DNA sequence: CGAATCGTTGAGCGAGGTCAAGAAAAGTGG
DNA sequence: CCACTTTTCTTGACCTCGCTCAACGATTCG
């Protein structure tokens, strides 16, 4: 989980609700998140909130800053976070290995966002929540943070609502339905997925878990 | 609108409904669109379709292929298209100028997608359509393709529905409302926006036109 | 142990979807 | 240029999924 080699590394900690970045500020570092969750979001004038990205352990936040991007939306910690700061100007300084990781991270972000556009534009409440839980589980799994069929899931139902474009109340009802259908077990911030293929299908996602 | 210098350039033409790329195929070129419109989309099993990107004259399609990305969704021509093909492997060969244009194009795509996640997740029908029309007009304008307060708008109401996550019927009703409110004039594939600031506001977008 | 925060459930409502049918454009071939 | 077909646009009637409002129970945290 080290940052770019040959560049000063700094360990940084954030507390829940603490900002990692604010809209339009020029960042001088991006983060490689060692531990904890964060999210990017936009708040509309009347209080509507939409989360547009989740950052899980092992993720870069935000990889495209190294290409000259700057925060167009705010980023806030959901849990306690331990991260490594990587200077944004370090593009040429990094090892090819880390350059590659950052670039593939940029590509993954574009693809994940495109998948979520489909979900927010065209899917039902159950499909949306299923998509989120698949996404979370598979990403945690890829980082070696799933145990059996379970992983940590620190999002509140309000967070889930702001990712899926629903209301907290309807998220609650949808989760109840999914529990009844034996699609998920979710309690005290811990998620268990008895049958991942079934959950993916109920999310209207392609069978191949990539 | 030239591609990367010192690399063989090829002019390519597409007809409406012709594919520029199909899901999961490895592309060997990306396109700089000289003229015409295209879109990226996903089709769900039961026929639901969501458009996840529009490509207008002057746009790269898709810029992140040069970083090693490959099509995760299909891309199809909406109108007749004239484009320049740019080899995907040409990353290091291009001039710094064109490298910069491609990278900033990647960043724009991430930011535009994040904005659309907010719109699809949290906005009303009228706000969605207003966002689309602002987006289209401002992009055309930046490419010198707006004339007075007008620009070309070749999307059908069904296309608009598939961008905004609505049904064609409801897009129609929403456009009628917007016409009555004097927010837009839209007829025979031609869009006029009497008051862009007002339209942006009705789209719940920040006042600054960037 | 008190105070937030978070989760759960019910009742009623409304924005947008569905179904259907016809009018207007736009494309096609003779 | 004109029949013919196909696509696109428009409008009405009705319905449903998810939202709103509200109250209360369960957790979590200081």
Image (tube, coloured by chain):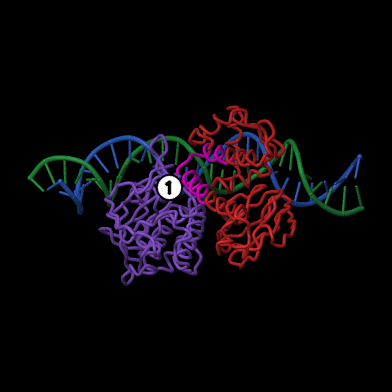
Chain colours: A purple, B red, C green, D blue
Q: Which residue is mark 1?
A: A165
Q: Is residue B143 left or right of residue B198?
A: right
Quadrant of residue C24 within the rendered picture: top right
Q: Is residue B76 left or right of residue A114?
A: right
Residue at the bottom extreme?
Answer: A148
Q: Is residue B49 magenta?
A: no
Q: Residue at x 59, y 51 (%)?
A: B101
Q: Give the vertical position of B193 relative to B19 (above or below).
A: above
- Residue B51 appears in the figure: no
Q: Residue at x 37, y 59 (%)?
A: A32
Q: Position of residue B146 (x, y in %)?
A: 67, 36
Q: Give the vertical position of A21 relative to A4 (above or below).
A: above
Quarter of the image for the N terminus of chain A: give it: bottom left
Q: Secondary structure at mark 1?
A: loop
Q: Is residue B112 magenta?
A: yes
Quadrant of residue B172 within the rendered picture: top right
Which range of residues does the magenta coloring cover? B110-132
Q: Is residue B138 left or right of residue A107?
A: right
The one of D28 and A41 positioned closer to us in this rendering: A41
Query: Which chain contains the residue that carries disc 1?
Result: A
Q: Position of residue B116 (x, y in %)?
A: 51, 46
Q: Position of residue B165 (x, y in %)?
A: 54, 47
Q: Position of residue A190 (x, y in %)?
A: 28, 61
- Residue A20 appears in the figure: yes
The one of A50 and B177 positioned closer to us in this rendering: A50
Q: Residue at x 52, y 36 (%)?
A: B203
The one of B198 and A180 positioned closer to us in this rendering: B198
């Amino acid at each position: 989980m080290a940052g770019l080699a040959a560049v000063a590394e700094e360990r940084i900690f954030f507390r829940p609700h603490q900002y990692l970045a604010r809209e339009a500020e020029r960042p001088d570092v991006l983060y490689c998140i060692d531990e904890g969750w964060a999210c990017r979001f936009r708040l509309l004038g009347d209080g509507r909130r939409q989360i547009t990205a989740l950052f899980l352990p092992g993720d870069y936040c935000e990889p495209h800053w190294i290409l000259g991007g700057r925060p167009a939306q705010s980023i806030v910690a959901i849990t306690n976070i331990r991260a490594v700061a990587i200077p944004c100007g370090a593009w040429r300084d990094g090892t090819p290995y880390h350059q590659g990781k950052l670039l593939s991270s940029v590509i993954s972000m574009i693809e994940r966002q495109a998948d979520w556009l489909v979900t927010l534009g065209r899917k039902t409440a159950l499909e949306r929540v299923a998509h989120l839980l698949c996404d979370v589980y598979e990403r945690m799994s890829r980082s070696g943070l799933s145990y059996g069929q379970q992983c940590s899931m620190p999002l509140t139902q309000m967070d889930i609502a702001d990712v899926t474009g629903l209301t907290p109340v309807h998220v609650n009802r949808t989760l109840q339905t999914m529990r009844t259908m034996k699609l998920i077990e979710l309690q005290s911030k811990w998620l268990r997925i008895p049958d991942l293929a079934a959950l993916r299908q109920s999310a209207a996602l392609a069978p191949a878990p990539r």
